[in-house]
Every structure is written in structure tokens, then in C-alpha cells.
Amino acid sequence: MNAIPVLAYTPLDQAYVPVLVMLVIALAFGLGTMIVSPFFGKNKPNAAKMEPYECGIPTVGTSRIQVFVRFYLVALLFLLFDMEIVYIVVWALAMTNPANAQVPGFVWFSMLVMFAYTAILLVGLIYEWKKGVLNWNK
Amino acid sequence: MTTLALIQAYVPNIHPAHIMPFLVMLVGAILCLIFDAMSDKQGSRDLLPWVAGSTLVATIMSLLIGFMPYNRLFAEETFRADTFSVLGSITIMLACLLAVIMGPALVSRRNIPSGEFYTLIVFVAFGGMTMALSNELLTAFIALEIMSLSLYVLTGIDRRSSRASEAAFKYFILGAFASAFLVLGIGFIFGATHTTHLHEIAAVLGEGSVDLVNGGAAALNPIWIFVGFALLFVGMCFKLSLAPFHMWAPDVYEGANTPTVVMIATSSKIAAFALMVHIVAALARWDLFAEGATYLVGFVALVSMIWGNLGALVQSNFKRMMAYSSVAQTGYMALALMVLIALPGQLEGAKLAAAEEAIKNAIVLYLVGYTVMSALALGIAWLIGGEGHMAGYRGLVFRNPIAATGMAVAMFSLVGIGFTPPTIGFMGKFYLFKEAVQYNFTALAAIAVVTSVISAFYYLNLVVTMFMREETEEAGVRLACMREQTFRLASSDALTRVAMASCTALIFLLGFFPNSLFLIADAIKEGFLR
């Protein structure tokens, strides 16, 4: 079994030195170009130059609009099913692995675990359903 | 193959009976949710507090019966149930039970969604218990988040109150920030020791070197343990409302509804203290740890004692006063935590173990005492509607002598030192300060005593207001109209009154016989079933 290459062999203070170097370089480059460029470039703004060219389109109206609360509820609904997918895909992959299928009782045990898990998620779905989140017209 | 045998074959290190309290709570919380979702009429929703309450009682029973192995690691070495954590868990349950008892009056008075309210209370208890029992830093972090998120929502559950929304927002933003510190600290400790299990961290620190995955070993780098502990401690200081991280406390206490304040003041602090004591006990196995950490924790304890008590002096709102008082009270407990850290430098072997046990017992005694005292104070304020300006308490004894007497008992007990020997507040402080003096922290103990005397001024000021001031027209009107709203809901208030009476009894019982608390611990150790 291979060890984690960096963390296992180097002490912690050395292991993060590359990250520190990267951070310093990134900060130095970003700030440096911002500080240095006004000294070298000519600054003659006009209306056409100040437009958000290739940075999207100019805003129409105010950007501080109110969003229908149901969109947030949809996001919450999504979270529930998202969690379901995240675990079921991994579980299904493990189930179809021939090596695991040889282990006695594996199928039943993993079924048990997944049923327990989906039962808890099902409670969430029932709760959302009964609270009327699925009813868009309410 | 039966189901149990199947589970045993696959997860041999997790016995279903060992995690019974967790299962009971989880099933209870889910039942609350389903019950709320399925009931169409308000009448059936009125049964919800009974579901939540019986869940909490069932968990207390399962803790008392002793499903969990005592002082031994269980469930993949994730949990450990020692005296501190089991007594702490039971106290957390009782505090949450009080919130459930106070609930119906709040729910109907402010028209709060009852299903969410009671379910979240059960989740607070679940998070608190898991945190107090956990032996593994990531489990503790997840438990902390379960508890904190439930508390954020409970703080702002009264959506029509702008103060509650403000309080919830402040609590949430600052709490999320503190959680980030906490998890970064855990990350540093993991980086230095290559494990998140507390007993393995203790072993690594004892050896002074880390076993690597490839079979080699690396020397331990002290800086990262200090950095990790400091960050972790900052995160926990926020949860414990220790100065200088207490800024949220007065606003949250004032804005949140009183049942939630009871839980913020007690449950979250017990859980955080239990975890802190376990972490400190693991890290203190390393002989260099005390040198830095003693100053850090000592500084926080010192600032909390002074700032909390001086801050409370100038408050005119009852709940804000209780917030500053909780800052001061946790400061005293942080003092004992500091002694716990410094101990390995002074003692060795069996003596050290005995001394550590004594300090832990002193902290848990004070935690239980503080829970009872603040539950009594907040509960009576809730019953008489005196959560606002303290002028409302003028001449309370002439209108409601029982409430005034109960509040006076709570206040005398909160003062503790010097005035009121047979109360839990005195006994708790006595043991805390005794430990500090015994291990040569006389200066800090002296400051603790002086600040306790300062605290007498604002606690007893309330007693003077209740007993020796004439009732003015304004104060009477203010209290009377709130009382009318509360007293209409007789059944909930009757139970709350019973709870308040038991709190008063407990203050004196534990004051006269502090050791009776540890009789429970011994009973758990033996186990009713084993």
C-alpha cells in the first residue's frame, strides 16, 4: 500500500511550504500588476472604453430584485435528492463489484443499510410533501 | 442469518445496544417530524410536546440503564461514556425537557410552527449528547453543527419578531465563523498527529513521534499542536460565550425566545465543556502543552470573569444581565479547565489521575448547578413575563410572593461565594476555587472571589428590587399585562411551575449534599441492567 506521498514523508511545516510559496507568488503577481500598470500605461477614459466590453451585458433595471421564495424551496428539495444520488451511486457500484458479491450476506447487509438510509430520506420527502412544498400553485 | 447477526458480522465494533440512546433520540426526532406532517388539525399537534418530551425521557432512561459501556471506547472507538459525559448528557436532556415544557405557551402565544419547534429541540439534545460523548474530533464537529444549526433556527423561529430575526442572524454569522476556526484547529491537530481520535492523539503525544503510513516515524512538531489547540479553543470559546468572544450573547439572549435561551445558556455550554475537557485531557499528556495552553485558557478565564461581571453591572434588561452572568460563570469553569491543563506539570501517576478526576467532578458539579440556577431564573422570568426591563420586578413580592422567593433563591445561588452556604452555587464555586488554590493559582482564585463579590451587587440588586422597592404604577402594569397572556395557558404553566419547584429543591439538595450527584454517576457505572 502506498503512503500519501507528501504528508507521510515530510514534516507538516515543510509539507505546506509549497502552498505558502504559491500563495506569496499569486498575491505578489496580482497586487504587483495592479500597482505597477498605472505607471506604465496611459489613462485616457472615454464612454466607449468604460463599457463592460466582453464582461457581460449592461444591467437593465435594478439588480436588487426579490426572488420568489419557492425557488429556495426547490433548492432545498434538490438537496434531498442530491444526497440520495451521491450515496446510491457509490453503493450501486460497490454492489455490482464481483469481488464483493462473493462475500456471504453482503447483498443483504448492503440492502439493509441502503433501506435504512432511504427510509430517513423518505421522512424528509414526506415532510416536504405534507408541508406543500411540491405544490407549485399553493 | 438474523438481522442482528448480519449487522454483527459486518460491523463487529458497533454493537446496536451500545448506541441505543442515539437510536432512541433519532427515532423520536423522526416521529416528531412525521407526526407534525401527518396531523391536519391543530388538536393533534398539541400532542407534539408529549412526543418530544417522552423521547427525551426515554433517552435519559436509556442513559441511566447503562446500555453504553462505562469509561470504555465503543462504536469504532468513536464514543466514550465517562462520569462527565453521562452526567452532562442527562443534564442536557433535562434542560431540553424544560424547553419542551415551556414550549406550548410560546407556540400558542406567538403562533410558532409547533412541529419544527419540538423537533429542533430534540435535535439540540441529540447534538449535545453526541458532542459530550464523542472521542473523535470530526464526530464532535458534526454533532456541534447539528446542535448549533438547530439553535440558530430556534433563535429566529418567531418570524414576526424583528429582534428574534436579528438575534438569529448575528448568532448564525458569528457561529459559522467560529465553526470555521474550530475545524481549522482540528485540521492542524490532525496534520500534526495523523489522527482525529482523542486516545490516539494522547498516545502520539506521549511518545513524541508520529507513526507514518509507510512504517516509519516522524518527530512531532510542537508548533502545530499549539496552533491547532489555539484555533480550536477560539471556536469553542464562542460556543461557551467566553470573553472576548461573547459579543453575540447579550443580543441573542435578549432577542431569542426564553425556552431557546434556556438551551443556549445550558445545553450548548455543557456539551462544549465536556468536549473541551476531553480534548484537554488528551493533549495534556504531552509535557510541553501546559506551558502555552495554561496562559491562553487562563487569560480567557480572567477576561471572562472580569468583563462578564462588570458588563452585567450596567444592564437594565433581565435577559441581557443573564447573558453577561453566563459569561462570568463560564469564566469560573474555564479557570478549572486551566488547572486541568497545568496539572501534569505538578503531579504524576495515580495522584495525577485522582486530581484530574476531582477537577472534572468540580466542573461537572458546577455545570449541573449552573444549569439548575439559570433554568430557575429564566423559567420564573418566563412565568411572570419579566423578561424585559428589570423595573418590572419592583415590589414583585407583594403581587407574587412565590415567584419572588424562587427568583431570590436563584439569585443568591448565582452569587455563590460568601453569602449562601447551603446552595449549589456556593458548593460549585467552593470546589472550583479550592482546586485553583490547591494547585498554586492563588492569584487567579483571588480574582475569582473578588469578581464573585462584585457579582453580588447586580444579583442582589434584583432581590432588593423585588423585596424592598414599592411597586410603581408603571412596573405593575408592565408585568400584569404580560402575566395575563402567559397565565391563560394553564397546563403548560402548571408543568413549568412544577419544574421550577424541582429546580429550587435541587439547588438546596445539591447544596447540602453535593455528593448525591455522583451517586447517580456510580449507579450508571454499575448499570441498572448489568
Image (cartoon, helix red, strand yellow):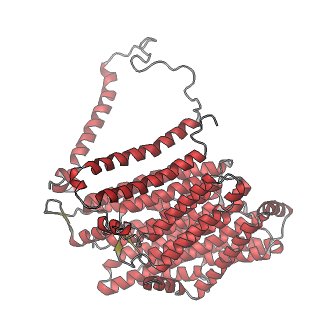
Q: Is residue A5 visible?
A: yes
User: Which residue corresponds to the image point at 45% horizontal and 44% vertical from the top-left?
Assistant: A81
Q: Quadrant of residue A69?
A: top right
User: Which residue corresponds to the image point at 33% horizontal and 28% vertical from the top-left?
Assistant: A35
User: Which residue corresponds to the image point at 19% horizontal and 56% vertical from the top-left?
Assistant: A11
User: Which residue corresponds to the image point at 29% horizontal and 83% vertical from the top-left?
Assistant: B348
**Looking at the image, which is closer to me, B356 or B372?**
B372
Q: Is residue B460 above or below residue B422?
A: above
Q: Left of B198 or right of it: where is B272?
A: right
Residue B47, percent from left and from top: 67, 62
Q: Left of B446 or right of it: where is B320?
A: right
Q: Left of B68 or right of it: where is B190?
A: left
Figure label count: 0
**Looking at the image, which is closer to me, A135 or B482?**
A135
Q: Is residue B332 above or below residue B112?
A: below
Quadrant where the N terminus of chain B sits is bottom left
Q: Is residue B325 visible?
A: no
Q: Is residue B293 above or below residue B65?
A: above
Residue B176, percent from left and from top: 47, 51
Residue B470, percent from left and from top: 83, 70
Quadrant where the C terminus of chain B sits is bottom left
Query: Which residue sits furthest right?
Result: B473
**Looking at the image, which is closer to me, B299 or B522?**
B522
Q: Left of B244 or right of it: where is B103?
A: right
Query: Which residue sits furthest front?
Result: B1
Residue B411, percent from left and from top: 66, 74
